[in-house]
Image: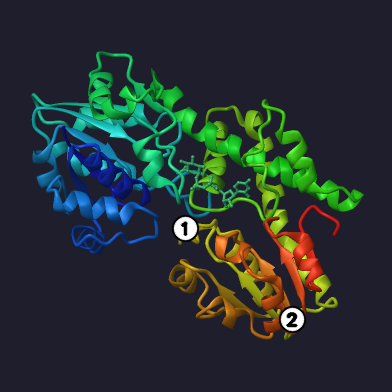
Amino acid sequence: MRMTVIGTGYLGATHAACMAELGHDVLGVDVDTAKIESLKAGTVPFYEPGLPEVLTRNLEAGRLDFTTDYAEAARFANVHFLGVGTPQKRGSYAADMTYVRAVVQDLVPLLEGDHIILGKSTVPVGTAAELQELADELARPGTTVEIAWNPEFLREGYAVKDTITPDRIVLGVRKEESRAEEVAREVYATPISQGTPFLVMDLPTAELVKVSANAFLATKISFINAVSEVCESSGGDITALADAIGFDERIGRKFLGAGLGFGGGCLPKDIRAFMARAGELGADDALTFLREVDAVNMRRRDRVVHLTRKLSGGNLLGKRVTVLGAAFKPNSDDVRDSPALSVAGSLSLAGAAVSVYDPEAMDNARKVFPTLDYAETVEEALDEADIVVLATEWQQFRDLDPVATGELVNNKVIIDGRNVLPVQAWQDAGWNIQALGRNL
Ligand code: UGA
């Protein structure tokens, strides 16, 4: 099949490359010339394991190309995926829909014949119906444009696997006559033939599925972090507790990782946009609990700063603090709303001399927080530290040898902000190890 993918950020670039990997002819489209040049040259402009290989393989096979030209996109195919960003609006909780609308405004007047736009971006419920009205107004006489919604559930760090073998495919279609299901079945013929559930529903439900999934995940993390606070006050141990409740199949152990909480470009802004949309629809009460989910999450960052100050003798001024991690999670170079960077920034603003190291996210971190000290290696970051904070659970940090690490630092004091270090081994090596939700 021929298709375009409009927007070549995280979602779009991955989708474009993976659709080509499934055998389709794909044209990726973006207004950002630098991004398009980079992708055309076979370079992924962000860190995503496995994606560079998929990109180069499909560029070489001639199934994948990129352009900034909407007219070329309009001629190239009759199926268009829309994968542009919907960031949080400045000064508001709502999602900024400027980029999504711009795609329809720029593309639709150029189309001829019968086209389908399959939205992948995370959007407020009601967006697809609005875009359909806009497309109907803008379409040339004799041209039809159908808007359907096909939300994306990929995780950064596992984006290729999640796109090629998703755990479900969701498709929202309009009530009027629709060709979207037939088209989507052809696009996703490979995963469907392998047994991936293919769920067809109305447009608002499909839009809601996506935000509900992210809101549920955020709630699960904040649930365990809220109980973590109670463990801290009562002498309980959150990891033993999470293991124990996780054995209940109805609960499950995944996303019960207590620690510094969630960040990134999705969970934080999606729960806020969900609340904002519910408010617009007159259903504010339904989602007020998400405010608490957000607050619990943010309190974990304060807790780590507080603990660092306490372990530094009550004063951070001039203390040498090493923060291990800057990305919002491992296997990613994404620092958007990163808990690690937030903690590093707060410690620095409180007067500590903060040294940060991350295996992949240093360049992005430097752009967001240029005033922090960025070390070249993990050893350099640890050199003469008064206190160490593990903020992102990269494998490299999990594997640190407590004995060798102890020889680099001034004081053997470490806060495990992600509950991943083997406590006994660190204690045996003479470390004062502290963790969130545990009394060690
Ligand atoms: C999330 C969803 O998991 C994807 O399904 C969704 O497609 C994506 O958002 C999106 O909307 O595009 P992602 O942002 O890549 O994916 O990250 P997650 O793996 O969900 O992790 C989110 C945050 O939660 C990270 O900061 C992570 O460190 C934190 N987390 C995760 C915890 O604090 N504890 C856990 O147990 C799990």
Q: What's the residue at 73%, 47% (across, down)?
A: 225
Residue 130, percent from left and from top: 34, 30
User: Is residue 109 left or right of 217 when viewed as pictured?
Assistant: left
Report helix, strand or loop for mark 2.
Answer: loop
Residue 372's image quarter? Answer: bottom right
Q: Mark 1 near ligand 1 (CB under 8 Å)?
A: yes
Residue 7, visible in the rendered structure = yes
N-terminal-most mark, 1 or 2: 1
User: Looking at the picture, which amino acid does disc 2 mark?
Assistant: Asp
Q: What's the residue at 62%, 31% (across, down)?
A: 284
Q: Which residue is mark 1?
A: 332
Residue 245, percent from left and from top: 75, 34
Residue 438's image quarter? Answer: bottom right
Q: CA distance from mark 1 to mark 2?
A: 28 Å
Q: Is residue 157 above or below residue 324?
A: above
Report helix, strand or loop for mark 1.
Answer: loop
Residue 16's image quarter? Answer: top left
Residue 432, visible in the rendered structure = no
Q: Is residue 375 above or below residue 336?
A: below
User: Looking at the picture, which amino acid does disc 1 mark?
Assistant: Ser
Q: What's the residue at 76%, 79% (across, down)?
A: 316
User: Is residue 307 left or right of 124 when viewed as pictured?
Assistant: right
On-image quarter of the N terminus: top left
Q: Which residue is mark 2?
A: 386
